[in-house]
């Protein structure tokens, strides 16, 4: 059997980016840990950069077996009807609108969706939810969800909802997860269900109830490759991609 073809979305660095790797060129890029994560399982990973021409999205989605929505820059708050609050964070409106259309088309075609960090937030936004644009300044009482130092990862427990697909996959009621985000889901989209929460109430996991595999986690399983839950999440996603693909 041919392994499933998995497209993953990418970050963008504008021409104005002064970081050394960009050198004044507009670039699409991806943190290599996502590639290693996919490569560690039986699938065919394929980079999917932000397209400005959304008319190609139905054919793109038809051609893949599953979509991995990766982490990255901030979701554009205008996509859920808010003014962007001033801050030092990069936002990526073209990627935001591209991913909204990808997600809606993937749902339409019943293609499995797996969202990591920003990708989890994107599933919520695409289905009509909103975000805390900045947890520290907007969500009173919330803990630090990203370390102020480099590396920016911190760790905290997450309670996993009984009866959820996530619970069935990881087989645990609590996980210690990594955390490297300053945004989070605020208003949950109407069709989604919360599957994981941090102790401060911040939403750490979501899914769409029902047959379709639409699952998001706020943490980064791709950087906790040694943890069985991270492997189990990817394997469950890929198994669903194989099942759903009609040509097999
Ligand atoms: Mn967190």
Image (cartoon, rainbow, N blue to C red):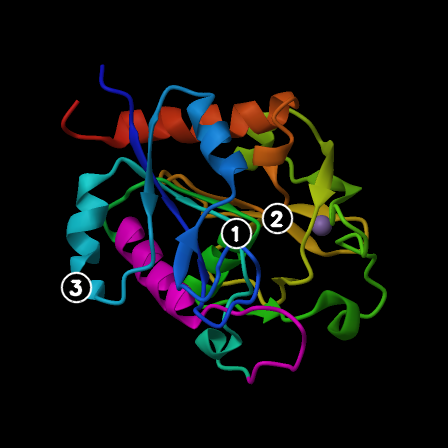
User: What residue range appears in magenta?
Assistant: 83-107
As rendered, which of 18 and 145 lies closer to the eye? 18
| Quadrant the C terminus occupies | top left
Residue 234 counted in the magenta span: no
Residue 55: numbered disc: 3
Of labels 1 and 2, earlier in sequence is 1
Marks 1 and 3, how far apart at CA: 24 Å
Of labels 1 and 3, earlier in sequence is 3
Q: Which residue is mark 1?
A: 120
Of labels 3 and 2, earlier in sequence is 3
Residue 218: numbered disc: 2
Element on which disc 1 rests: helix
Tag 3 near tag 2, CB within 8 Å: no
Q: Is mark 3 within 8 Å of ligand 1?
A: no
Q: Is mark 2 within 8 Å of ligand 1?
A: yes
- Mark 3 surroundings: few (<14), some (14-19) or many (≥20) residues within 10 A: few
Mark in the foreground, 1 or 3 = 3
Tag 1 near tag 2, CB within 8 Å: yes
As rendered, which of 108 and 70 lies closer to the eye? 70
Mark in the foreground, 3 or 2 = 3
Residue 84 counted in the magenta span: yes
Tag 1 near tag 3, CB within 8 Å: no
């Amino acid at each position: 059997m041919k392994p499933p073809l998995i497209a993953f979305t990418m970050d963008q660095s504008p021409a104005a980016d002064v970081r050394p790797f960009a050198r004044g060129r507009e670039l699409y890029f991806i943190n290599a840990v996502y590639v290693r994560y996919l490569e560690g399982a039986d699938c065919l990973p394929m980079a999917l950069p932000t397209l400005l021409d959304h008319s190609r999205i139905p054919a793109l989605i038809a051609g893949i077996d599953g979509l991995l929505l990766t982490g990255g820059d901030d979701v554009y708050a205008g996509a859920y009807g808010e003014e962007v609050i001033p801050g030092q964070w990069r936002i990526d409106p073209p990627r935001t609108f591209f991913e909204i259309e990808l997600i809606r088309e993937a749902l339409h075609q019943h293609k499995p969706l797996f969202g990591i960090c920003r990708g989890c937030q994107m599933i919520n936004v695409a289905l009509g939810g909103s975000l805390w644009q900045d947890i520290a300044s907007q969500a009173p009482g919330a803990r630090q969800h990203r370390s102020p130092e480099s590396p920016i990862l911190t760790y905290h427990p997450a309670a996993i909802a009984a009866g959820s697909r996530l619970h069935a996959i990881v087989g645990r009621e609590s996980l210690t997860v990594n955390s490297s985000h300053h945004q989070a889901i605020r208003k949950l989209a109407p069709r989604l269900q919360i599957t994981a929460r941090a102790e401060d109430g911040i939403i750490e996991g979501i899914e769409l109830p029902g047959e379709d595999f639409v699952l998001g986690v706020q943490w980064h399983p791709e950087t906790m490759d040694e943890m069985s839950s991270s492997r189990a999440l990817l394997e469950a996603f890929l198994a669903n991609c194989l099942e759903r693909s009609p040509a097999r």
